Amino acid sequence: MIKNSYKQIIKSVKDQSRVKGLTHRFYTYPAGFSPKFVSSAIKNLTKKGDIVLDPFMGGGTSIVEGMRLGRKTIGIDLNYISFFVSKVKTTILKPEQREFVEKWIIKLDQKLKNRIVLDKFTKKALSLINYKGLGKGQIYRLKLILNGCSYFLKNLKKIKNKKVNNFLRLLILRSMQSTLHNKRPICEFETFKQKIKSNCLDMLDGMNELETNIKLNSNKKIIHNSTMYNKCASKSLSNKYLKKKKTKLIITSPPYPGINVYYGTWQIHGRRNTSLPYLILGMDRPVNRSILNFQHPKTKDLKIYFKTMEKIFSSLYKASNKKTLLMQLVAFNKLDGILDEYLATMKKCGFKEIQLNGKKRIWRDVPSRSWQSTYAKKDLPSSKEVLLLHKPNGKATIN
């Protein structure tokens, strides 16, 4: 099957078009997949009813595409933001719930005042943002936007339906992200209000499109065939379903060795990262910031990283059989030794590298991407990713 489909997969893996369609733009998660690549891989390498597993699901792209195409999808991620975003992306609201969402936004927008009240949320949010050095006008606009966010979150507490509540919370999160993250100067308050309304319509349209696609691929019925876990992949693969039926395709993009991605944080006015997204979701940021990358951001020592990946790959091996294909997109900012060690870790866990129809490894450029790397900028820029393909070879040297 790989030999007949490799051209389509190679073409799609190099796709650099803007992410759009379905629920993919519900939230911008760092180091995300191209939906075209995931869709091509699932279409060409699996059939309806097969299990598609993503042990580092991130923004949930593989889960959405698998669900759309009628596959049983399993997603795992240690980051709660990833879990929350993916859960909302794959939840279809009823027509009356969608109508309620639209009316709720319009009603609150009309009542939202252009004024500053230093309530508990606003004070906490300001404590998480380095706004020193900003002009008075920008600080004023920042406080107005935080107050607007607080206003929506307070009213959100009155909504008891969990699915509706989660959708609206993600709407607020997305609107704050598109208003504040990497924006210079701080946007006007009216921009935030406009984002809330336009994002609401865009997300509802995306949900409608996903629902239509699912029905086309599942005999006009909405089948909730996705399961997600907010844990490390090494602890979540005891899934009862996987014990009965092994996964056909594992498609993922793991944390990159030697490259630190700021998962779950934003940059306000180009200044230091803020954990504001966690506050909006009503939770604390992980105390250990390195836990999501499996490595400390200020060290070149990758022992913890490879030890963790060894445990995860061992779990993936147990969830596989001889027909399973493992596809990964990984970035290496320093090729010398690290790629070899990565491949050696996989071999130790029972996976053998293969190429698409005998071709060399496929590298892709990722536009508009920059990471904080623990290494000097040499060998390879961290905006380069490589597609690695493996199959179980039955020769794992660890349990």
Image (cartoon, grey):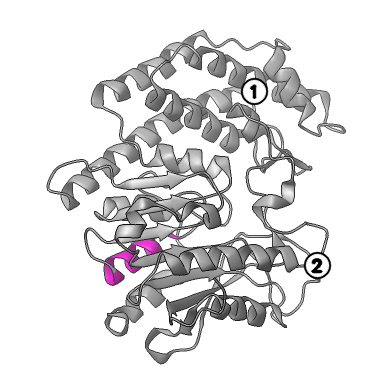
In the rendered structure, the answer to whether residue 212 lies left or right of residue 306 reads left
* 35 vs 222, nearest the viewer: 222
**Type of amino acid at the residue the image marks with label 1:** Ile
x and y percent of residue 79 in the render?
A: 58, 45
x and y percent of residue 201 in the render?
A: 38, 31
Residue 312 sits in quarter: bottom right
Magenta stretch, residue numbers: 34-45
Q: Secondary structure beneath disc 2?
A: loop
Which secondary structure dominates the residues rendered in magenta? Answer: helix
Give the residue pinned by disc 1.
Answer: 145
- Neighbour tally class for label 1: few under 14, some 14-19, many 20 plus, Cα within 10 Å: many
* 115 vs 349, nearest the viewer: 349
Give the residue pinned by disc 2.
Answer: 300
Residue 276 sits in quarter: top right
Residue closest to the far right: 133
Residue 371 is tagged as none
| In the rendered image, the vertical position of residue 208 relative to residue 137, given as above or below | below
In the rendered structure, the answer to whether residue 211 lies left or right of residue 117 reads left
**Magenta-span inclusion, residue 39:** yes
* 15 vs 65, nearest the viewer: 65
- Neighbour tally class for label 2: few under 14, some 14-19, many 20 plus, Cα within 10 Å: some
Reading the chain from its start, which is encountered first: label 1 or label 2? 1
In the rendered structure, the answer to whether residue 209 lies left or right of residue 149 reads left
**Type of amino acid at the residue the image marks with label 2:** Lys
x and y percent of residue 220 in the render?
A: 13, 44
Q: Secondary structure beneath disc 1?
A: helix
Residue closest to the far left: 219
Tell me if residue 147 can be seen.
Answer: yes
* 390 vs 297, nearest the viewer: 390
Tell me if residue 27 can be seen.
Answer: no
What residue is shown at x 67% (from left), y 42% (from top)?
A: 265
Q: Quadrant of the C terminus?
A: bottom right
